[in-house]
Image: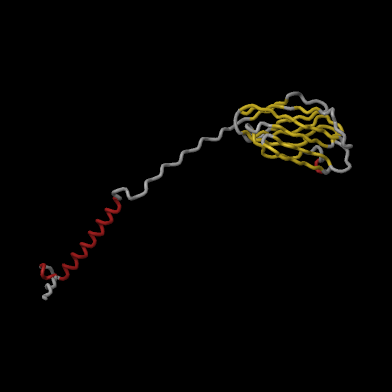
Amino acid sequence: MRRPPKLRPGDFGLRPDDFGLRLCNLAIVSLLVITVCSSCGGGGSGSPTAPPAPVPPPTPAFRVQYSGSGAPGADSLSWRQQATELPGLLRIELRATDVHNLYGVAFDLLYPNQLMRFERAEEGTVLDGGGASSTSFLLARPQDGVLVIGLTRLGSQGGFDGSGALLVLELSALRAGTGTLEFDAQRAIAADGRALPAVRWIDGSLTVE
């Protein structure tokens, strides 16, 4: 069987140098065509661009105002609002006014948990005498909207006479509305362990707007 004759560059009227040059030019043109077609992306082979995420609405800057249900007087415990630069934060101190022989307090605080969230608590300087007296400060949250608080001196110390902050609470606003801060199961204790029934506990109300 006869094999077909091999073609040589001269059979096309080309010199060997011309034939190699044209093959090189053909390869370059083919490469350019492939590159251009790939850039076109025809047929949607690329992934679509995801739309930008929506911008969340700004957090409202609440303002909280507290007011007591009565004026504090001698032998009373009441909340007093303290100034704060943080919007929506209620910082209140439980203040003793002209008390005598106060050794400790225990009470439940009922607050509107649908409006406010408890953040933190700290002891004041009245019972510990600025660090000079030993004290115990306990706080529990058995359920939403209830704080169980106990604060007392320890050991054979006398009770406190005078006025000042027993403790400080911080609560942050969740939504606008009105509610109350109420004492429940409250007791004021003298140094000998007896209750001090003359002490008045003054509730209050708050407004979030």
Task: Give the side of residue 156 with respect to residue 68, left or right.
Answer: right
Of the pair 193 and 53, the residue shown nearer to us: 193
Tell me which corner region of the image, top left, top right, bottom left or bottom right, holds residue 171. Answer: top right
Question: Vertical placement of 149 versus 71: above or below?
Answer: below
**Farthest-out residue, bottom:** 1
Q: Quadrant of the N terminus?
A: bottom left
Of the pair 106 and 55, the residue shown nearer to us: 106
Q: Position of residue 173 (x, y in %)?
A: 62, 33
Of the pair 182 and 23, the residue shown nearer to us: 182
Tell me which corner region of the image, top left, top right, bottom left or bottom right, holds residue 209. Answer: top right
Q: Position of residue 26 (x, y in %)?
A: 20, 62
Of the pair 102 and 143, the residue shown nearer to us: 143
**Residue at image point 80% right, 37% down:** 126
**Residue at image point 20% right, 65% down:** 23
Tell me which corner region of the image, top left, top right, bottom left or bottom right, holds residue 140. Answer: top right
Task: Give the side of residue 108 with respect to residue 117, left or right.
Answer: right
Q: Position of residue 13 (x, y in %)?
A: 10, 68
Q: How is the image coloured?
A: secondary structure
**Farthest-out residue, front:** 1
Number of marks drawn: 0
Q: Position of residue 99 (x, y in %)?
A: 84, 31
Task: Give the side of residue 194 with respect to residue 33, left or right.
Answer: right
Question: Vertical placement of 16 versus 171: above or below?
Answer: below
